[in-house]
Image: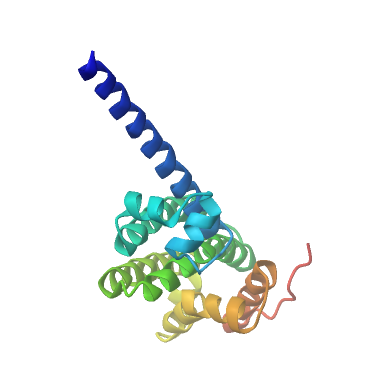
Amino acid sequence: MEQGLGSEREDGRRRRSQRSRARILEAIADLLDAGDSDLTIERVAAHAGTSVSTVVRNMRDQEGLAAAMNEIAQARVIKHLEGGPFEGSTEERVTDLVRRMAGMFETVVPLLRSMHRFRQDERLAVERQRIDGVNRAYVDSALAPELAEGPPELADVLHSVVSTSAWSHLRRNQGFDQERAAATMRTTVLRVLGKDWPTPTS
């Protein structure tokens, strides 16, 4: 009988732990989606409506929290980048490229800042390299005809214009909202390509 009660109590603790972890992961996802770069254990606990000790127990430490953030962010990056091959005119392809990249940047920039705050230098370096690789691949794919016709340095310029650092500057330093930052990035790319078109209004 006591063994049965002990098993029930253990099952109850396990279910509560699973529910707590689910709330914590949901809180991390919400904060990332909101572009919140202040993803400390305390902020996650407050958003999840639980205690700091509960977050620590589920995530172990800041490295565990960073790993959970990274897992969630990667799933969202994949979603933002969906859309098939780039097609249409230069303007249409640039618009599509910036739309996809803006979604990715909104997810990964807060993640990178939090990793820096948590002093996750090795993880940060790996993630930066991965994001840069994805970014370059999408720029090269979207603008392949223009890159083929342009000078060798055109690729480097475009990779700098469409980048996490450029996005962070527009959003954080310039104080632009996501729509204005995307419009500015789009216009910059078009001007680099010699297409001086006005920014579309929505």
Q: Residue furthest top?
A: 1
Q: Is residue 17 visible?
A: yes
- For residue 86, say whether it is visible: no
Camera-side residue: 8 or 82?
A: 8
| Residue at 71% over, 76% down | 197
Q: Which quarter shows the N terminus? A: top left
Q: x and y percent of residue 50 in the render?
A: 49, 49
Q: Does 187 sit above or below residue 10?
A: below
Q: Nearer the viewer, residue 39 or 33?
A: 39
Is 70 or 89 nearer to us in this picture? 70
Residue extending furthest toward the right:
201
Please give the name of the residue rendered at 52% of the width and 50% of the height, measured from the top-left corner: 48
Name the residue at the left extreme.
3
Which residue is drawn at the image coordinates 38% and 67% (left, top)? 131
User: In the image, is 8 to the left or to the right of 200?
Assistant: left
* Residue at 47%, 74% in the rendered image: 164
On the image, which quarter does residue 103 sit in?
Answer: bottom right
Location of residue 179 in the rendering, given as x and y in whole percent from the top left corner: 68, 67
Q: Is residue 53 left or right of residue 31?
A: left
Residue 23 in the image: state x and y as whole percent.
48, 44
Q: Nearer the viewer, residue 12 or 36?
A: 12
Give the mark count. 0
Considering only vertical position in the picture, is 147 above or below 7? Answer: below
The image shows residue 51 at horizontal and vertical percentages of 46, 53
